[in-house]
Image (cartoon, helix red, strand yellow):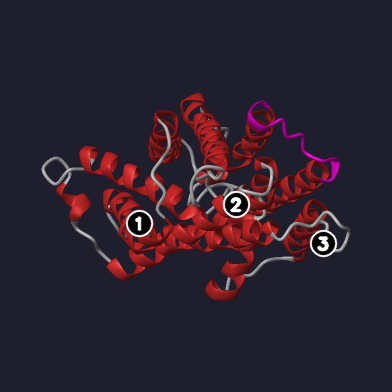
Amino acid sequence: MSSSGPLPPSSPVPPARAPLKALIPLFGSTIVFACLDTTAKAMSSYLPVVEISWFRYVINLLMAMVVLNPISSPGAWRFKLPGLQIVRALLLTVMTLANFSALRYLQVAETTSIGFLSPMVITLLSVIFLHEKIGIRRVIAIIVGFLGVLLITQPGFGTFHPAMLLALASMFSGAVYNLVTRHLATRVNPGSLVISLAAVPSLLLIPALFVVWQTPSSPLVWGLLTFMGAAGGFGHFLVMTAHRFATAATLAPYSYIQLVWTVISGYLVFADVPSIWTLVGASVVIASGLYLLHRERVVHARGMAAAGVWPK
């Protein structure tokens, strides 16, 4: 599944222009995640969402075990802070199940647009749980972002679909997942984060498979399920590669290009054309997210300058 939107910057260095060697894998990841969500929507017509999600993670786990095997990467099999790693994996499992369930009824562009609200929710959660302070400008940006989602969902105007609540649940789970990931990123071996993230849902969803299992009906379905697992792992690999060459603050604005690919893939595969309200609402959410990122950068830069880390 796709990432849950660009994160507000948390890097200790000032953001700079993203180099090409960071943008290429980042753009590649947005294409991969758009294809992943489009495939998940197509698969929902053939198989239960739980089964689709299980295949997505178990194939990802098999790939990770090959690349991060105990011989070549022993550190990946030492699980520090196991409780928090399990919580992180559970959050991503909820995000995937909710997102794939929403995709059964909504356009890919709609779920992606709602997911872009994630940076605003992350900022709110940081205020509540991390006691971070935000100014009135960022508060306004968050409010405007929520208004953008209301334009997309239009509750009370006859176009609201209950599956939009699933998309919102997926977005919220993803926001909390990103906060937990931030906490673990500097404390835990990256390989163990990859292994645990695939292993927990692979094991967790097995009991449900005994209830909902349907054998894939054709080689095409098997192939698409395999593609989903590979795409999930490859997409996150591309994101990690991009972040080796640029900060999260630098790369975040470019992540919104994913909406373009979801509109294209949705049209090519399902002949879906986003409504004008989806496009307007998505534009409002993206604009709010970009302004929020800008204010985060400004506040961060002022703080670092005041501390004498770099000149004003």
* Residue linked to disc 3: 155
Q: Nearer the viewer, mark 2 or mark 3?
A: 3
Look at mark 2 in the image and give the residue it sits on: 301
Left or right of residue 276: residue 34 = left
Contact? badges 1 and 3 (CB < 8 Å) = no
In the rendered structure, which segment of residues is drawn in magenta?
A: 268-277
User: Which residue type does callout 1 highlight?
Assistant: Thr
At a point 61% along the width and 48% down the height, the residue shown is 104
Task: Give the SS element for disc 3.
Answer: loop
At label 3, counting other C-alpha atoms closer than 10 Å, the crowd grade (few under 14, some 14-19, many 20 or more) is few
Q: Position of residue 274 (x, y in %)?
A: 77, 38
Quote the CA–CA distance across marks 2 and 3.
Answer: 39 Å
Residue 61's mark?
Answer: none
Crowdedness near tag 2: few (<14), some (14–19) or many (≥20) residues, C-alpha within 10 Å? many
Marks counted in the figure total 3
Task: State the image coordinates of residue 201 (x, y, percent, origin top left).
Answer: 37, 57
Which structural element holds mark 2?
Answer: helix
Residue furthest to the right:
157
Please provide percent x and percent y for residue 310: 53, 48
Q: What percent of the width, then of the height, locates residue 119?
A: 62, 55
Q: Which residue is mark 1?
A: 186
